[in-house]
Amino acid sequence: MKPYNILISGGGTGGHIYPAIAIANEFKLRYPDANFLFVGAKDRMEMEKIPQAGFEIKGLWISGVQRKITVDNLSFAFKLISSLWKARRIIKQFKPDVAIGTGGFASGPTLIVANRVGIPTLIQEQNSFPGITNKLLSKKANKICVAYDHLERFFPSDKMIKTGNPVRQDLLTIHSKRKAAVTFFKLDKIKKTILILGGSLGARKINELIENNLEFFKSQEVQVIWQCGKLYFDTYKKHSDLEYVQVHQFINRMDLAYAASDIIISRAGASSVSELCIVGKPVIFIPSPNVAEDHQTKNAKSIVDKHGAILLKESELETFPIVFETLLKDRGKQEHLSENIKELALPGATTDIVNEIEKLLKK
């Protein structure tokens, strides 16, 4: 039997890229001789992250539609035509047996062409509120893997299966890594550790909040691991001079960062939420209000409504010191949040998604 050719498209943010890599790695475990090709958007972070993970990627000239009239919007039609044409050429050369979309600009043209030429397609929707690309693709997709309940109003129910979001497999064993994590980050093993995550690019409001509360953290006798993001590192790296603060542009060993932490402050992107359910630590979610359909708030609420986390909106950040100190001093509350968020974890997501891909291939 000839090796499978697997085409995967997704990107723009870590939330679309890491699920794609997790799916590819799981498939590769089962079929070591399979061939993989990723399709991303030129100049986006997938063009760097996918090769780092050991896979080949081709870039399309594509971007999203802005909500206001811009030069980018005027060129969107040209970009879309160019991307459809290039996607057709990629598919003709690679001859995929299946095409998988994990969201982001490039997955639109790639899966549209795959559907047109009769290649089975699977889309993986990470959010509780789907993006426009996946809503459009769902009409022709063979299978839709989702992470939340009640998505029937967006997708055909007969194609949907709830799998959860793929997460890094090294997170499944973080509870045995505490000692290694303390050594890796050079932490004081007596003090509580706070982990700050603003997403792969960073979050301005969260970074400002943390900078404004550095003295407060000192008074609480906690140490801070702060991932400020690529866009903000030059602004905030100076705070690493404080003995209880370390500022990172990006954390490569997220398993150890999670293992070291006692409380986590995070955005509520879909991948982050899924990871945090598996990690099972007390979380304060500060969702970004600047995303389509406010889906981060909806993601966070799905956990908060089941008493698994605390939600703090950007408009309420002045209450942060009270919210944080109350949680820090209430051991019972921390344990309660941990137990409840763990109940919502779907650690078998990657396996379940690859099972669905295998079913499509065997048809």
Image: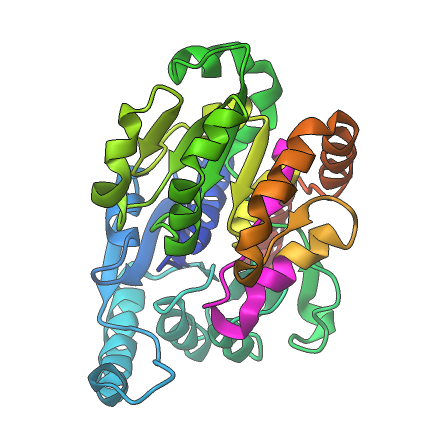
Provide residue 318's location: percent of width, then percent of height.
54, 53
The chosen color scheme is rainbow
Quarter-of-image position of residue 186: top left
280 falls in the magenta region? yes
Would you say residue 2 is visible in this rendering?
no
| Location of the N terminus (image quadrant) | top left
The residue at the point 30 percent across, 52 percent down is 46
Closer to us: 199 or 243: 243
Quarter-of-image position of residue 253: top left
Left or right: residue 287 versus residue 79 is right
The residue at the point 36 percent across, 31 percent down is 252
The segment highlighted magenta reads 279-299
Q: How many marks?
A: 0
Provide residue 270's location: percent of width, then percent of height.
55, 54
Would you say residue 234 is visible in this rendering?
yes
The residue at the point 26 percent across, 58 percent down is 44
| Location of the C terminus (image quadrant) | bottom right
The residue at the point 42 percent across, 10 percent down is 183
Quarter-of-image position of residue 329: top right
From the viewer's perspective, is residue 363 above or below residue 236? Answer: below
125 falls in the magenta region? no
From the viewer's perspective, is residue 141 above or below residue 261? Answer: below
Closer to us: 150 or 54: 150
From the viewer's perspective, is residue 347 above or below residue 305? Answer: above
Provide residue 228's location: percent of width, then percent of height.
35, 42
Left or right: residue 169 versus residue 343 is left
Left or right: residue 21 versus residue 264 is left
Provide residue 323's location: percent of width, then percent of height.
64, 43
